[in-house]
Image: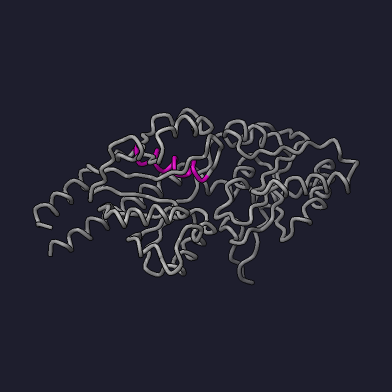
Amino acid sequence: MEKEKLQGIIDSIKNKDFTLYFFTMDTKGVAKYSIKHTYDIVQTLTELGYDARILHEKDDYHVNSPIGWLGDSYNNIKHTSIEKDKLTIKPIDFVIVPEVFANVMEQLRMNNVPSKNIVMCQSPEYIFELLKPGKSWGSYDFYDVITTNKQVSDYVKDLFPTVEAYEIPVGISEHFKNEHKLKKPIISIMCRNQNDILKISKMFILKNPIYGWLNFRDIRGMAQEEMAHILDNSFLSVWVDDISGFGTFPIESMKCNTPVIGKIPKMIPEWMIEETEKGKELKQNGVWVNNVDEIPDLIAEFTKLWLQDELPEKLFTEMQDTAKLYTTDVLKEKTKEVFETIINNRITEIEKLMQ
C-alpha cells in the first residue's frame, strides 16, 4: 500500500474518523449481563467521541431483542444491521467479536475484511464452541483480546500465546444500592441451570419445613431496576454458575448489602480470592462452597443467624470493600485506557508498514 494511503489511514485514526463495531448476539429480549457489559463499553466510547456501535446480524434485532431491560440511558447507542445496512468495513475500523463466535472470525478472514479485529472474552467456556480443531484466534487474524479480569486474561494467553490481553472490569450499575436497611424474608437466587434453583429451594424446604415461609425469588432475566429492587429487599442471595468468567450477580448483591451463598466456579474470580502469607485464600466476602448440595444447610444456618441478629460484622465489611472496586467510573476509566492503547498500537502497526 502506498505511503500516502497509509498516512491517510493514520490521520483518520488520529482524528477518530473510524468506527468500532461490537458484534452482539440476539438475546430475544431476555436480560443477559454479558451483553450489558458490551453496551457499557460502547456507551463509554461514544461519550469519548468515538463512533462506537452495536453490530447485529438481522434487521429485526430491535423487534425480537428489545433492550428495554437495560434502561433508558442506553437508548442513544447506535446499531448497525449486517442484513439491512450497506456495511463497508474499512482498514481504519475495528471489529470486536465475542469469544463464542469463531465462525464470525472465520468469515471476516475469508472475506478479507481489512479491519483491526479484537476478541471480547467474558466466558472462557465458550471459546471452543465454534472454533475448529487446530485453529486459534490468530488463524483468523485476531491478536488482541479484551477480558473482564486477569484470571481470564492469563487463561487466554496460555491457550493463545500470540494474543495481547487487556482487562476492562465489569461496572455495576448505580441501581444496585442499599436503600432498605430492614431486609425482608426473601432469598434471591441466580443459577445458570434452572435445575439447580429447583434442587436448592426444594431441598431447603424439605429439610427445614419450619422456614417454609421464606420466599425464593428466581431473578434471572429481570430488568436492572426490578432486579436491584428485589436484591435490596432480600436478606440473602444464592449464586451457582460454574462457567462464570467474572460473576456479576454476587457483586450486585454486595452493593445491596445482601450476603451471598455461592458455589465456587471453575475459574475462581479475582474478587473471591486474596493473597496471604499462606498463599491464595478465599475472601470472607461471602459464604463459598464446592458442592451445590451444601447450600440448603447453609441457608438454614444463615437464616437462624439473621433472625437472631448475629451475622458476623466482618462479612459485611468484606462485602463493602469488594463492591466498591467495581463501579461504572472504574469501567469508564479502564475502557478509555484500553482502547487508547489498542488504537495507538494500531497506528504503530501501520507506521511500520511505511518503513
> Looking at the image, which residue is at 27% across and 58% down?
345
Pick the front one: 17 or 280? 17
Query: Is residue 150 rendered magenta in the image?
Result: no
Query: Compared with residue 310, is residue 123 higher up or lower down, i.e. above or below?
Result: below
- Which residue is rendered at x = 36% and y = 47% of the image? 336
Give residue 208's position: percent from left, percent from top: 88, 46
Q: Residue 41 at x, y = what percent? A: 41, 43
Task: Name the residue: 68% across, 42% down.
Answer: 258
Foreground of the two, 147 or 110: 110
**The C terminus sits in image quarter:** bottom left
Left or right for 100, reference 15: right
Closer to the camera in the image, 354 or 26 = 26
Q: Residue at x 49, y 34 (%)?
A: 65
Q: Report the coloring of the rendering.
A: one colour
Q: Position of residue 300 (x, y in %)?
A: 83, 48
- Which segment did they paint magenta? 34-47
How would you classify the magenta stretch by its main secondary structure?
helix
Image height check: is 320 above or below 154?
above
Q: Quadrant of residue 229?
A: top right
Q: Is residue 196 left or right of residue 34?
A: right
Instruction: Tell me if residue 37 is in the magenta stretch.
Output: yes
Closer to us: 308 or 199: 199
User: Number of marks in the image?
Assistant: 0
